[in-house]
Amino acid sequence: MENQMKTVCKDAPDVLDLDNSTLIGGGGVGDAYGEDAATEDQTFTPWTRVVASGLELLRDPRYNKGLAFCEEERARHYLQGLLPPVVMSQELQIQRILQNVRAYETDLERYVEVMDLQERNERLFYRVLIDHVEELLPIVYTPTVGEACQKYGNIFRRPHGLYISLKDRGHVLDCMRNWPEPNVQVIVVTDGERILGLGDLGLQGMGIPIGKLALYTALGGIRPSATLPVTIDVGTNNQDLLDNPFYIGLRQKRATGKEYDELLHEFMTACKQAYGEKVLVQFEDFANHNAFRLLAKYSTSHLVFNDDIQGTAAVALAGVLAALPLTGGTLADHKFLFVGAGEAGTGIAELIALEVSRQGNTSLDEARKAIYLVDSKGLVTKSRFDSLQEFKKPFAHDLKPNSELVAIIKEIKPTVLIGTTGKGGQFTQAVLEEISSYQEKPVVFALSNPTTQSECTAEQAYKYTKGKCIFASGSPFKPVTHEGKTYTIGQSNNCYIFPGMGLGCVISGAIRVHDDMFLAAAESLAQEIGEDHLEKRQLYPAFSEIRDISAHIGAAVAAKAYDLGLATKLPRPKDLLAYAKSCMYSPVYRPFR
Ligand SMILES: NC(=O)C1=CN([C@@H]2O[C@H](COP(=O)(O)OP(=O)(O)OC[C@H]3O[C@@H](n4cnc5c(N)ncnc54)[C@H](OP(=O)(O)O)[C@@H]3O)[C@@H](O)[C@H]2O)C=CC1
Ligand SMILES: CC(=O)C(=O)O
Ligand SMILES: [Mg+2]
């Protein structure tokens, strides 16, 4: 039985590791409950292990099987009379759930239904999600999760995850200790300031860490009990939310400066205190003025990465690598134009430059020369150097200022156009016509999420380039038929990367995340694309294959961690892929004794 125990008393031992029946943080050997270690003037916690039964069992989502409890289990666990007489297989339960989900009129209703299931019967939730991932990913993830975050206060039913606010300063660790799971391995944390391309949603951004971690489990096989979604509430500058009576966060403007930094630091420190050195912390949907500096600050002391900067970089690089057989040439033969020069844009730009420099044995600066950025003020040029944010400076070119995208494309003639603006519709008809006027097979990625913020739709991309482009998007689009040929739209979304990245870190016991681990993840993902995919211009594999793909990515990431001396799980398994697969959580019902 997984234990639910936690330290609630200052004088009691710090961390219980009941799997090993040893005490970490004080006390004698085998003194798992801290009784011997406590002196007479200290209080200690009277720990008990309880076996869930009866209604408690039915109400515990980790163990509940609903109507799937068999007769013997019902008898043994005091469930008789608490359930209707029918015993239903998990397969039939899945069919019933799907029928209900499909009957709703809106995707938001489907979201509420599916997330309710997560709160009721965790294994059934993951079984349905894994077996029907292509249908349900757009519900639990982009685009629907965006709408859910916008309306989170209104659809709020039960708390899920950890809410840490400015009010908790000085006792963040206590908040973390209130979380019932002692063996957390992956934390996804946001402060809600840049939720997808929807801006500042404050505490309502919580839907994102919850959704991302559901994918860590469903796509990457991380145990649900090892995942912890966190939202740090420092207020919001979204006036509509502040005025909304149903808003669930602090009703104040965002804290900044020292106040912000101290809370974040307390949180980062508490992560390690509560879960040890090797807990993976994924920064998610922070605004870029915090994202880059938090990543720089904590990447040398913690196992952290920023999904929007680094995860996105790996998935986009994988897509470009996969497109090379169609475009011809090598990565170094391409010229890249990024429209949107923030976390996603410059993150991808840097990883592409790193890959080019590795492949060609050239310097990073040399590789960056083929990469151009456009931000809200126009082309990133040397003339703007002094006022540019640090992360844009390496890509400033000696060109004249220009804020007109078609004119910029005319001048630079990129072969790869990548949108990461968070602003829908930037790839207009004129933009798409221009890039296809000189390029036989332009690569066009519209990466902004959710669908409403996409730089163009898949249909527009194929229509305005007259079927020439090789297109991918951040949110899902249905296949497009243009002049009799049907194109499958690959979803260039970091959800292809972070589950495998997490798996790789966990199975190797990695202590730090290194850029080479993202290169390894990108190369592994690109290898999944074969001629049959390229025939349909599909740059990413089907999500139905994703668990196997995550295992491959996990093995590649772990291998890199071992090669770099960053892995602590020794000896290194001989067959990392088999090991990765063997570690993955599977949500089949377990028989209870
Ligand atoms: N597909 C995927 O996996 C991912 C997609 N994304 C999506 O990418 C988008 C951006 O995210 P992120 O990079 O973190 O956000 P940032 O805020 O860090 O960056 C946005 C960038 O877009 C620029 N911009 C805004 N409006 C325009 C415009 N009209 N023309 C040109 N540039 C413009 C901004 O300019 P300025 O610097 O001047 O403000 C900024 O450089 C979001 O929609 C997000 O959902 C993000 C991560 C992963
Ligand atoms: C996918 C993602 O992380 C984003 O849009 O922010
Ligand atoms: Mg994100």
Image (cartoon, helix red, strand yellow):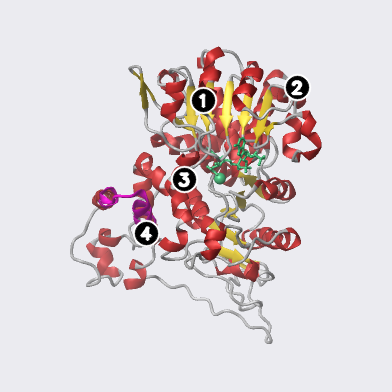
Mark 1 or mark 2, earlier in chain: 2
Task: Residue type at mark 1: give it.
Answer: Gln
Q: Amino acid at mark 4?
A: Asp
Counting from the top left corner in percent of width and height, residue 430 is at: 52, 23
> Looking at the image, is mark 3 or mark 1 earlier in the sequence?
1
The secondary structure that most of the magenta stretch takes on is helix
Residue 411 lies in quadrant: top right
Q: Which residue is mark 2?
A: 366
**Mark positioned earlier in the residue sequence (4 or 1):** 4
Which region is colored magenta?
A: 100-116
Query: Mark 2 vs ligand 1: CB under 8 Å?
Result: no
Q: Is residue 185 or residue 250 the one in the foreground?
A: 250
Q: Residue at x 44, y 27 (%)?
A: 460
Alpha carbon distance from label 4 to label 1 = 37 Å
Amino acid carrying label 3: it is Met
Q: Which residue is mark 1?
A: 527
User: Mark 4–mark 2 contact, CB under 8 Å?
Assistant: no
Find disc 3 in the rendering and name its residue: 584
Q: Quadrant of residue 459?
A: top left
Callout 2 amino acid: Glu
| Circle 2: element type | helix
User: Looking at the image, is mark 3 or mark 4 earlier in the sequence?
Assistant: 4
Residue 37, position as x, y percentages in the image: 66, 77
